[in-house]
Amino acid sequence: MAASVDIWWTLGSHAEPVTAAPRARAPSTVPAEWRRGLRGRFLTDISRRCHEQRSWNAKGAARGWRFNLPAGQHLSLTDSGNCLIIGVGQGAPIGIDAERLRPVDDAASTLRRLHLPRLADALGQMAPKARQRAFAHVWTAFEAFLKLERLPWDAAAARFAGWQDKWGFEADGRARFGGPGVAFQTVDGIPDILLTVASPVPARISVREWGCDPIVMPRPNGRIQPVGELRRSKDLCR
């Protein structure tokens, strides 16, 4: 079976308050803030949507909603600012991470702390806009790999550092990875966000906005989107 990843995103809150009503029924491995309020509703809706797909492995689904586990269905969560993102993998484990595309003052020093001096030197030769994109590519790849492998930070950093010769950059900062054993796929379909999916093999990726919560959501341009403008998809909001 070919690997596939479904990505859903929405604009929500930076973190749900402790007082927000719990909603999602999920294992304790899912962070508490993802089981409350808007995040909990988002997670519950995507869980229901995926369990209704007949193509999903029944045995895996019967064990319940899984969080970034290397068997059956695979869930990974990330957020950047007020953008909330859920990735669901089938056929291969996944890890996802997102960064808002913005200026980064200490990109090179951050990569040096990650034991990536050659990549830090490469970024130092780039124009500011290309540098911010290149850093977002590398950093989200590392964080996605960390989630994929479920490793301690130092262990993941050591393995990731061994691949620094496998990275290359285009003039605009877009990164390409040519190493074995893991695929890093970038997703540009979310406004102002760069998302990376890490998996053992390349996967078919689909991206869609979650439109099931009928509330007013701030858009990336700061405009408040009226409820009537929210895109609602019948196959997502059953």
Image: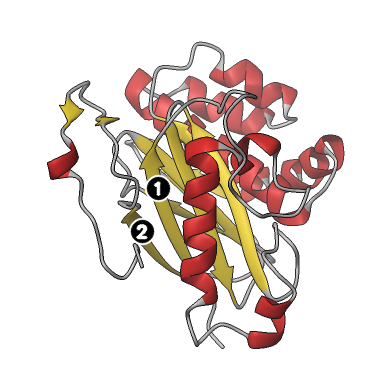
Amino acid type indicated by mark 2: Val
Instruction: State the residue in front, 227 or 107.
Output: 227
Q: Nearer the viewer, mark 2 or mark 1?
A: 1
Can you tell which quarter of the image residue 63 is in?
A: bottom right
The 10 Å Cα crowd at callout 1, few under 14, some 14 to 19, many 20 or more, is: many
- Residue 164 position, x and y percent, is 66, 43
Q: Are marks 2 and 1 in contact (CB under 8 Å)?
A: yes
Left or right: 133 with respect to 146?
Answer: left
- Residue 82 position, x and y percent, is 43, 28
Amino acid type indicated by mark 1: Trp
Point 26% across, 67% down: residue: 234
Residue linked to disc 1? 9
Way the structure is coloured: secondary structure
Instruction: State the residue in front, 14 or 97.
Output: 14
Q: Residue furthest top?
A: 105
Residue 91 vs 24, above or below: the answer is below
